[in-house]
Amino acid sequence: MPHELPGPGAGPEPRQPIHAFAASAGLLFLLVGIAGFIPGVTSNDDELAFAGPDSAAKLCGLFEVSVLHNIVHLLFALGLIAAARVAWSRIYLLGGGAAYLLVALFGAVVERESDANFLPINTADNLLHLALGVSMIALGILGIRLSRGRPTRFP
């Protein structure tokens, strides 16, 4: 007979795939956020601006970054904390995916030199943000589906 999920304060939840999906995404964002500040990994690091399209720094020589952009990546490392609970993981993956789709839309619509542009984004960034948004939403949906009908405890 399957056990019910524990309530708040009842201890850790049984591990589900969605926990690993959120933790993996969080770890990826943590590494990328840190890498955005490392000379060599980030080219033109001496031209790293706080925000705006004027930052000439590029992560791996391809993706435009700024201090603000790197901080946002570090904030998305919250997936490591979200991975503690199924509900948090679901919110993180689906909400974070939606946020990245909005950033991709922003990058596609707002002109690079516009006063409305506060991000250093180029075509590579836009494509990456689109892929991240779709991937996070797909992992959230997959994680939800995989956790349905599964035993709450793994052997």
Image: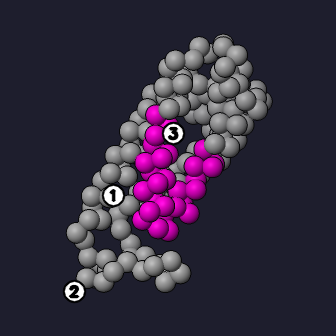
Q: Please report the residue visible at 72 percent of the width from the left and 20 percent of the height from the top.
A: 54
Question: Quarter-wise, where is residue 152 in the image?
Answer: bottom left
Measured as percent of width and height from the top left, residue 2 is found at 25, 82
Secondary structure of the residue carrying numbered label 1: helix
Which region of the structure is painted magenta?
73-101
Give the amino acid type for the residue marked by disc 1 in the picture: Gly
Give the label, 2 or 1, closer to the camera: 2
Above or below, 17 against 49 in this view is below
Residue 64 - label: none
Q: How many other residues sit within 10 Å of disc 2, few (<14), some (14-19) or many (≥20)?
A: few
Q: Tag 3 or tag 2, which sits nearer the N-term? A: 2
Q: How many other residues sit within 10 Å of disc 1, few (<14), some (14-19) or many (≥20)?
A: many
Give the amino acid type for the residue marked by disc 2 in the picture: Met
Secondary structure of the residue carrying numbered label 3: helix
Q: Tag 1 or tag 3, which sits nearer the N-term? A: 3
Measured as percent of width and height from the top left, residue 8 is found at 50, 77
Q: Please report the residue visible at 53 percent of the width from the left and 31 percent of the height from the top.
A: 103
Q: Main secondary structure of the magenta part?
A: helix
Residue that numbered label 3 is attached to: 99
Q: Tag 1 or tag 2, which sits nearer the N-term? A: 2
Residue 120 appears in the figure: yes
Residue that numbered label 2 is attached to: 1
